[in-house]
Image (spheres, grey):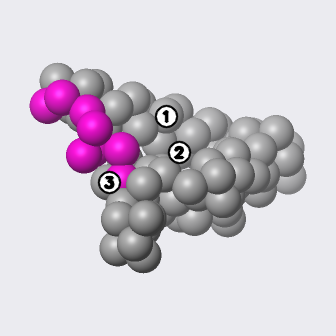
């Protein structure tokens, strides 16, 4: 397999990097890792898009968007609760 074809396939390190960032964001509450998580997820989608139908690709992008909205909402709620407790 040549290098160009190898780069277009989803590699185990791609999955592990995305999973690690997801664990940081969701389990540890490290919201500073959210941009890394979204970037890694985007790279996975770009690589996987070559094997997905247009409908599957739209659903995958929608799922990422829903998760991003959920995480941002949770971050905003956490910050609001922190400000209320400090007051």
Q: Secondary structure at mark 1?
A: helix
Nearer the camera: disc 3 or disc 2: 3
Which residue: 73% across, 40% down?
26
Q: Is residue 13 above or below residue 15?
A: below
Instruction: Name the residue at the front extreme.
Output: 1
The residue range painted magenta reads 47-54
Classify 10 Å Cα crowding around label 3: few (below 14), some (14-19), many (20 and above): some
Q: Nearer the viewer, residue 48 or 20?
A: 48
Give the main secondary structure, helix, strand or loop, of the magenta stretch.
Answer: loop
- From the image, state whether disc 1 or disc 3 is nearer to you: 3
Measured as percent of width and height from the top left, residue 53 is found at 18, 29
Image point 70% across, 52% down: which residue?
16
Question: Is label 3 in a helix, a strand or a loop?
Answer: helix
Q: Earlier in the sequence, mark 1 or mark 2?
A: 1
| Residue 50 magenta-highlighted | yes
Q: Nearer the viewer, mark 1 or mark 2?
A: 1
Q: CA distance from mark 1 to mark 3?
A: 18 Å
Queried whether the magenta region covers residue 86, the answer comes back as: no
- Residue that numbered label 3 is attached to: 46
Element at badge 2?
helix
Query: What percent of the width, then of the height, locates residue 86?
Result: 85, 52
Of 80 and 70, which appears nearest the observer? 70
Q: Could you say where residue 40 lies in the image, as x and y percent from the top left? A: 52, 59
Checking the image for residue 67, the label placed there is 1
* Residue 74 found in image quarter: top right
Does residue 6 appear left or right of residue 36 in this picture?
A: left
Given residues 76 and 46, the one toward you in this image is 46
Task: Report the residue marked by disc 2.
Answer: 72
Up/down of 79 relative to 51, above or below: below
């Amino acid at each position: 397999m040549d290098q160009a074809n190898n780069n277009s396939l989803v590699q185990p390190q791609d999955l592990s990097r995305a999973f690690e960032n997801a664990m940081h964001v969701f389990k540890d509450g490290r919201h500073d890792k959210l941009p890394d998580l979204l970037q890694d997820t985007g790279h996975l989608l770009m690589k996987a898009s070559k094997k997905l139908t247009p409908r599957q690709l739209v659903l995958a992008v929608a799922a990422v968007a829903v998760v991003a909205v959920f995480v941002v909402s949770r971050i905003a709620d956490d910050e609001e609760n922190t400000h209320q407790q400090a007051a």
